[in-house]
Amino acid sequence: MAMNINEYAKTIEKFGDFDPDLGIIVNEISNTFRNFSDNVTEKANKEKLLNEKNINYINYCKSYKNILQVRDKKQKSKKEYHESLKFCDDELKNLKNDPEYELSGVIPFIDRVYNKMKGANLNLHRKESMEKLEEKIDVLKNKVENSEKDSKMFDKVVANEIEHFNKYQIIDFLKYLNNYINIQAEFFQRNKDLFDKLLENLEQK
């Protein structure tokens, strides 16, 4: 738009070549449109800068969404650790309380068949299974404890982000609208003054 207005100013200027008496008037009109073109460029630059800041706000919203997704993954991991710990704990209790109990799952079944085929000491194998379960339970307990701490800390971070987001999103958006309106008001007022001055000068000719 600014380029078109500037080209229009050049076109007007050429009328002075055909009639020297119109030179001063033509120059005033041409200069007015050149200033108008400059105002359009300045307005566009201000709007661009303002919108770039607003895009950063949109990026912040995306980051906020990513934080929630990370929190969901952490909650899922914590749940899986709890379920694994309960399963192993139940298996260990069953092995200790019931001599006939056998571990569930495909791998334990294959392991039992293999040990029977090679004539291994099943009681010793049972004892080793319980020791492995106890070791696994200790590892899972640490994971559960760490995941609980991590989850609480992350929930606190998310809560702070939510509070910050809710507090400032309206303020920031209203500030953006106010700045945008001021740019428009300044633009139209400057151009009104520009053409008012032109009309005043033309009336005095």
Image (cartoon, rainbow, N blue to C red):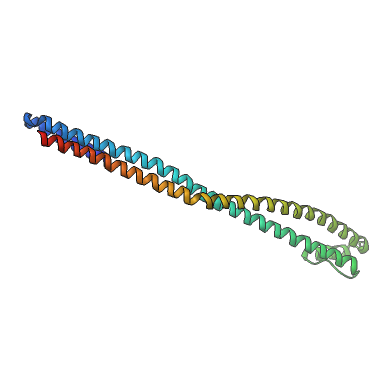
Looking at the figure, which quarter contains the N terminus?
A: top left
Residue 158 placed where, x, y %? 61, 52
Compare residues 122 and 156 and report the one nearer the observer: 156
Q: Determine whether, in the image, residue 114 is placed left or right of residue 168.
A: right
Q: Is residue 112 above or below residue 144?
A: below
| Left or right: residue 70 compared with residue 198 | right
Q: Nearer the viewer, residue 12 or 197?
A: 197
Name the residue at 70% across, 51% down.
150
Residue 184, image quadrant: top left
Instruction: State the image quarter where residue 13 is shown.
Output: top left
Q: Is residue 201 left or right of residue 181?
A: left
Residue found 85% across the figure and 63% down from its top:
92
Q: Quadrant of the C terminus?
A: top left
Residue beneath the point at 17% across and 36% down: 198
Residue 176's spot in the image, x, y percent? 42, 46
Q: Is residue 3 left or right of residue 92?
A: left
